[in-house]
Image (cartoon, grey):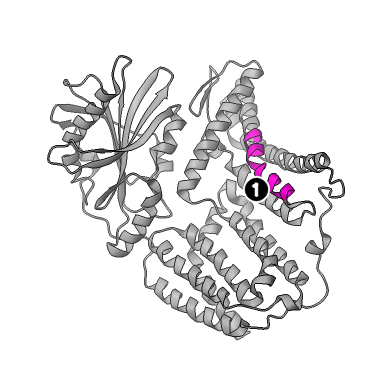
Amino acid sequence: MVAACLFAVALAFVFLDGLIHAVVSWEREEFSYGYIVPPLTVLLVWHALRDMQPQQSRGTWWGVALIFLAAAITIPAKVGGMPTFTFYGFIVALYGLALTLYGWHGTRRLLFPIAYLIFALPLPSTLYVNVSTTMQLISSVLGTEALRALGYSVFLNGNIIDLGLFQLQVAEACNGLRYLFPLASFAYLIGYLYRGPVWHRVVLFLAVAPITIVINSARISLTGILVNYKGISAAEGFMHAFEGWVIFVVGLLFLFAFLQVLIWITGHREAFVMRLDIDKIMPKQGRLPEPVRASSQGLMASTVGLLVAAIALASLPEGANAVPDRKPLAAFPLQMGSWSGREQSLDQIYLDILQVDDYIVADYSSPDHRAPVNLYVAWYDAQDRRASIHSPAACIPAGGWEITHFDTQTISSLDAQPPLNVNRAIIVNGVQRQLVYYWFELRHRQMTSEFTIKLANVWDAIALGRTDGALVRLVTPIATNEDDAEADARLTAFLQESLPVMDGYIPD
């Protein structure tokens, strides 16, 4: 009992950041269902143990190794400011505990109940932004088409639905993720309790995404209709929230109806939707299986390993505290050689999403070039749970632009400057075409892949005590009678003048 209490305390301390992050995430509307995930997980684990036979409870030392691995995950997760991965480490540690106590054969019954905890936390930020943007776009298109089918005159530009007198923005809060995550968790739960074939469960889970898109598009259409008759107030406050709950209930009904139709089509009439395994959800008499081999020793070894990890974590800061001296971007020059700039500003709605610490947006023109260049630099003092760099690849489609060409290229024609790797994209909106260059400035390197930023942040947080960084983006229009190479030459000429100036504002 003492060993179990010590293990529980050490486990909670090591993975505390991830657990707190999960609870904080549940305050957001789309993850408010997260409060019921841990109690349901405990219930599922409890009854899986009740079903376990004594001969299935032989522990293995592989579980101890898995707990050590989970503890090791928390160190880079903390210094890199990634509490999501700390929570994932907690799930791995629980599976390691199950292996330590009950071995491979017994833990098979516990795998799916423990894995249910994955639904208690949002996706990692980079993946979340990409999924969110995709859901917004698909829902906007389907919602607009539904309004047109009903006879309404609407125009869609990115995530803006123009109803004539009113414009309806399909913002991040309306991306459908508030339906996707809870419906996915319900589908997983139904699949675990369901008696039918395994492939039924897989198809049911995969059906969550199209069901979510359909019901979210229906919500957008309904909102558009109400706004058209009652004004913009129909898309705000209580009415908007009430619509959301009604649509969610509809989504649940669709989920059960889909499974019932699947059962009817495939002929598995004996496996009705509500005919669940009662033994899995009702208590059974008798004691839990006793772990009999490698359990007490493994539990003590795991406790020692977690205590060591706890001491190491206590000596490490979360994220990085060092912020280099730099000039504020508000002082960035608007005159660079022949280029003259006019500064702009971002609306507060975008600043709330981006969480930048400093930024500049300016349009530069030159008498030597036929079109202007838009410069956007977003600076972050630290990339952690609060904020991280957003890739333009996810944000460009939200403005109504389609990426028709995307690659990474090296610009080596810059005088007195080292070669620069940039992401190069050609984007189209109707008859308009634009050329986009962007890259990420992370301390002493330029990077083009958003997925490697987190790894670089972890390394530099340990080696340099820094996770600061910036996004640099250049955009120029491509005229109808202009060759793409001319637009490339224009951006290269702007880089020739601006890169030396950036050094003081984006320090190495």
Quarter of the view holding residue 493: top left
In front of the other: 32 or 134:
134
Q: Is residue 102 above or below residue 444?
A: below
Quarter of the view holding residue 113: bottom right
Q: Is residue 239 left or right of residue 418?
A: right
* Amino acid type, residue under disc 1 in the picture: Ala
Q: Residue at x 60, y 73 (%)?
A: 97
Considering the numbered disc 1 on the image, is that residue within a helix, a strand or a loop?
helix
Overall secondary structure of the magenta section: helix
Residue 373 in the image: x percent, y percent?
26, 27
Regarding residue 33, the answer to whether it shows in the image is: yes
Residue 55 in the image: x percent, y percent?
74, 78
- From this viewpoint, which residue is outermost toward the right? 270
Residue 319 in the image: x percent, y percent?
37, 60
Quarter of the view holding residue 471: top left
- Within 10 Å of the Cα at label 1, are there few (<14), some (14-19), or many (20+) other Cα atoms? many
Circle 1 is placed at which residue position?
Answer: 184
Residue 84 in the image: x percent, y percent?
49, 57
Say whether residue 13 is magenta. no
Which quarter of the figure is the N terminus placed in? bottom right
Q: Is residue 207 above or below residue 195?
A: above
Q: Is residue 417 left or right of residue 125?
A: left
Residue segment shown in magenta: 199-215
Q: Is residue 4 above or below residue 389?
A: below
Say whether residue 208 is magenta. yes
Q: Is residue 249 left or right of residue 413?
A: right
